[in-house]
C-alpha cells in the first residue's frame, strides 16, 4: 500500500477529518489532502508530526491496519489483547488444539 493510502486509512480508522488531523499535527489541511492523494511526498518530519497526533510511532503509523500473526500462550494472548484494545488494532483469535 502506498503512503497516501496508508495515511488515509489511519486517519479514517481514528475517525478524524482531514481538518482535525491537520490541527492536531500542526499541518495545513490542503497538504494532508495532497499527501493522501499521492500528490505530495511526506518528509520524516511530517510523518513524525502525523504519528504524534495519533500517539503512534512512525513505524506504527506506516503499518497501521496491517495484518500480523502471532502465536502466544493464553496468558500472553490475554495480556496482548489488553494492550491492543487501546491501540485500535483489529484482533482475530484462532485457537488450535496442541
Image (tube, helix red, strand yellow):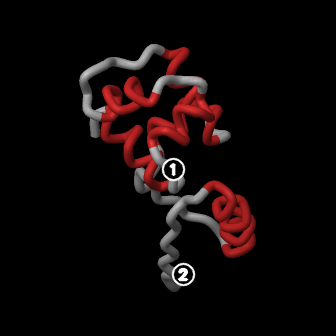
Q: How far apart are marks 2 and 1 (CA)?
A: 43 Å
Relative to residue 83, is residue 94 depicted above or below? Answer: below
**Which one is nearer the viewer's eye here, 75 or 32?**
32
Residue at 45% x, 40% y: name it.
18
| Label 2 residue SS | loop
Query: On the image, which quarter does residue 58 sit in?
Result: top right
Image quadrant holding the C terminus, namely bottom right
Residue that mark 2 sits on: 98
Q: Nearer the observer, disc 2 or disc 1?
A: 1
Residue at 35% x, 32% y: name it.
33
On the image, the x and y values in percent for residue 9 come to 39, 48
**Which one is nearer the viewer's eye here, 69 or 4?**
4
Residue at 73% x, 66% y: name it.
82
**Which one is nearer the viewer's eye here, 54 or 68?**
54
Image quadrant holding the N terminus, namely top left
Query: On the image, which quarter does residue 63 sit in?
Result: top left
Check whether the beta carbons of the residues at disc 2 and disc 1 lie within 8 A of each other.
no
Q: In this view, does 61 lie to the left or right of 72?
A: left
Sequence-wise, the earlier of marks 2 and 1 is 1
Residue that mark 1 sits on: 16
Amino acid at each position: 500500500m502506498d503512503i497516501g493510502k496508508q495515511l488515509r486509512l489511519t486517519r479514517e480508522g481514528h475517525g478524524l477529518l482531514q481538518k482535525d488531523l491537520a490541527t492536531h499535527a500542526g499541518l495545513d489541511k490542503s497538504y494532508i489532502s495532497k499527501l493522501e492523494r499521492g500528490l505530495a511526498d511526506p518528509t520524516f518530519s511530517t510523518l513524525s508530526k502525523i504519528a504524534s497526533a495519533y500517539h503512534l510511532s512512525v513505524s506504527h503509523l506506516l503499518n497501521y491496519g496491517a495484518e500480523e500473526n502471532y502465536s502466544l500462550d493464553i496468558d500472553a494472548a490475554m495480556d496482548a489483547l489488553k494492550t491492543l484494545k487501546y491501540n485500535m488494532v483489529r484482533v482475530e483469535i484462532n485457537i488450535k488444539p496442541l
